[in-house]
């Protein structure tokens, strides 16, 4: 693992104000994107701990690679894509077989009423590929084309996953209404 000086590109010959500007820029990037990245990671992994690790890993990759972005939106999109990829890798790992109670996940999602709380339970019960697209589309406000770029899928695949996820949610709601 690289040492902290190489990650932050500290040049001891550079003046203190340049270093301060770089640190402030990094802090702003972290502050601006952490919540969105965490919510996305939580939707994919269903684990608060895995989501926290994925967000941290995504920021480490950002600081190591130091990519140049066209805009703040491009940077945010890149961070979300990296976070989703890290989550998928964590889900595929052999040691990850432990599950977290649904109640722990729901604590991290704000739900203004019991209906929203029930809907979030249903969304979190979806398979990962459907949870991811639903979260990015409805909770983070991405268009299907942007989700396709983030998840490295075709736009038509994302639209189909949204359609199937909506159908699944509709079925869950209808089943719940029948029980009442």
Image (cartoon, rainbow, N blue to C red):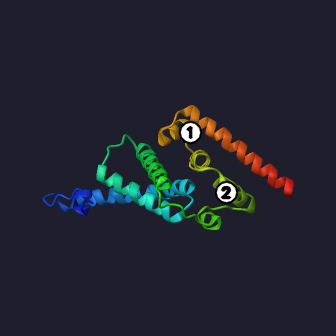
Residue 29 seen in the figure: no
| Mark 1 surroundings: few (<14), some (14-19) or many (≥20) residues within 10 A | some
Q: Residues within 10 Å of mark 2 (few under 14, many from 20)?
A: some
Q: Which mark is residue 120?
A: 2
Give x and y (percent) for residue 99.
Answer: 58, 64
- Seen in the picture, residue 96 relative to 138 is either above or below; the reply is below
Mark 2 to mark 1 CA distance (whole Å): 20 Å
Q: Residue at x 81, y 52 (%)?
A: 175
Q: How many marks?
A: 2
Q: Is residue 35 above or below residue 153?
A: below
Point out the image quarter for the N terminus.
bottom left
Pointer 2 or 1: first along the chain = 2
> For this rendering, which residue is in front, 155 or 32?
155
Residue 108 position by quadrant: bottom right
Mark 2 secondary-structure assignment: helix
**Residue 161 screen position, x and y as percent:** 62, 40
Does residue 115 appear in this view?
Answer: yes
**146 vs 133, nearest the viewer:** 133
Q: Is residue 44 left or right of residue 63?
A: right
- Residue 33 horizontal/vertical position (percent): 45, 55
Q: Which residue is painted at 52% across and 38% down in the image?
A: 148
Residue 119 location, x and y as percent? 71, 55
In the rendered view of the protein, which quadrant contains the C terminus?
bottom right
* Residue lying at 67% horizontally and 61% vertically, measured from the top left: 111
User: Tag 1, which secondary structure?
Assistant: loop
Numbered tag placed on residue 5 in the rendering: none
In the displayed structure, would residue 122 be above or below residue 104? above
Residue corresponding to mark 1: 143
Q: Nearer the viewer, mark 2 or mark 1?
A: 2
């Amino acid at each position: 693992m690289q040492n902290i000086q190489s990650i932050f590109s500290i040049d001891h010959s550079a003046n203190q104000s340049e270093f301060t500007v770089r640190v402030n820029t990094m802090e702003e990037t972290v502050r601006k994107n952490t919540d969105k990245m965490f919510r996305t990671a939580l939707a994919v992994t269903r684990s608060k701990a895995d989501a926290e690790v994925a967000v941290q890993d995504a920021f480490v990759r950002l600081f190591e690679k130091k990519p140049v972005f066209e805009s703040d939106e491009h940077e945010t999109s890149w961070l979300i894509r990296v976070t989703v990829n890290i989550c998928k890798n964590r889900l595929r790992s052999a040691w990850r077989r432990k599950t977290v109670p649904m109640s722990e996940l729901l604590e991290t999602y704000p739900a203004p009423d019991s209906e929203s709380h029930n809907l979030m339970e249903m969304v979190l019960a979806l398979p990962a590929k459907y949870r991811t697209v639903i979260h990015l589309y409805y909770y983070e406000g991405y268009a299907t084309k942007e989700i396709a770029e983030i998840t490295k899928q075709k736009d038509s695949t994302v639209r189909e996953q949204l359609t199937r996820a909506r159908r699944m949610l509709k079925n869950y709601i209808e089943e719940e209404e029948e029980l009442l």
